[in-house]
Image (cartoon, rainbow, N blue to C red):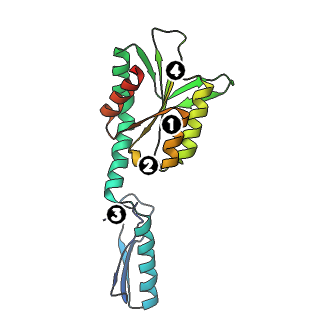
Amino acid sequence: VRHIEHIGINFIVIDGVESLLCFPLTYKSESPSPVQCLWSNFVGFANILSEVFMDLWLKAVSPPIRLAKIQFMRAIGEIPKILGVMAEDRGWLLEAPAIIVGRSGLSQKFDIALRSRNLVPSNPIVADFLLEESNVKAALITLHLKAMDVEAAKKILIIPKSDLLSQDEKEMVSIYGINVVEGLRADEVSQRIMEIIGE
C-alpha cells in the first residue's frame, strides 16, 4: 500500500493484455460527474498503463512515512501554543514566526524565536523546522548564517526523525553548534526545546 495524490483516473490491467481505464467526463465540477470507461485488449495500451502504474508506485509514499509527515505538520501547528505557555512560565517571550533584524541590516525570518523577558536586550534563541522535502545541508547552512547575523544565543533545528540527517549532515550540526530536536508531538518537542534553553 502506498499513498499518492489522486490522479483523477482509475485503471486496471489484467494479465498484461486487457485493460480498463475509467475517468470522469469533466474535471470542472465539484459535484460527482458521470464516469466514462474504456476497455481494451490491445497489448500495447496495457503495457503503457502498466508503465504508468509502476511510475506512480515508485513515486508514491509508504503509509508510515506519510503518517509521520502528517503528525509532524500537525505538531508544527500546535508547537507555538504549547511552547508559548511553557516559555512564558519561565520568563521567555515566544514569536512564531519571527522576523529579527540582524547586524547586516537584513530581516532574518525564523519559524520560532524566544527572548528573555528579564534581560533586555537579550540574544534570541532561534529555531527552524525541517520538512522532509527540504534540502538538509542548505537548511543547516541557512539557519547557521541567519543565527550568526542576529547573534542568537542558541539555534535549534526541529525535525520529525533523526534519520533524515546523513553522517555529513550530523557533522555539520556539530560544527555549527546547532541543537537538533526530534519529535512528532508538539508537547515532546516543546519540552525538549525548554530543556535546551535551560542548559
The mark nearer the N terminus, 1 or 4, is 4
Looking at the image, can residue 54 be seen? yes
> From what the image shows, is residue 179 above or below residue 115?
below
Report crowding for label 2: few under 14, some 14 to 19, many 20 or more residues within 10 A (C-alpha): some
Residues at marks 3 and 1, CA–CA distance in whole angstroms: 35 Å
**Residue at image coords 37%, 42%:** 72
Please, what secondary structure does the residue beneath circle 2 have? helix
Instruction: Specify the quadrant of the image occupied by residue 92.
Output: top left
The x, y position of residue 95, in whole percent, is 47, 23
Q: Which residue is mark 2?
A: 164
Distance from label 1 to label 4 (Cα)? 20 Å
Q: Where's residue 187, x and y in %? A: 30, 31
- Three-letter code, disc 4: Pro
Q: Tell me, yes or no, whether the two marked residues, 2 and 4, touch with CB atoms within 8 Å.
A: no
Closer to the observer: label 2 or label 1?
1
CA distance for labels 2 and 4? 26 Å
Asked whether the beta carbons under mark 3 and mark 1 sit within 8 Å of each other, the answer is no
Q: Amino acid at mark 2?
A: Leu
Q: Taking 131 as reference, is 86 left or right?
A: left
Q: Quadrant of the C terminus?
A: top left
From mark 3 to mark 4, how far is it between C-alphas? Answer: 42 Å
**Above-or-below relation of 39 to 28:** below
Q: Which residue is mark 4?
A: 124
In the depicted view, which residue is nearer to us: 89 or 45?
A: 89
Front residue (pair 50, 104): 104
| Residue annotated with mark 3 | 2
- Amino acid on which disc 1 is placed: Ser
Camera-nearest label, 2 or 4 = 2
Horizontally, is 115 left or right of 80 in the view? right
Identity, as a three-letter code, of the amino acid under mark 3: Arg
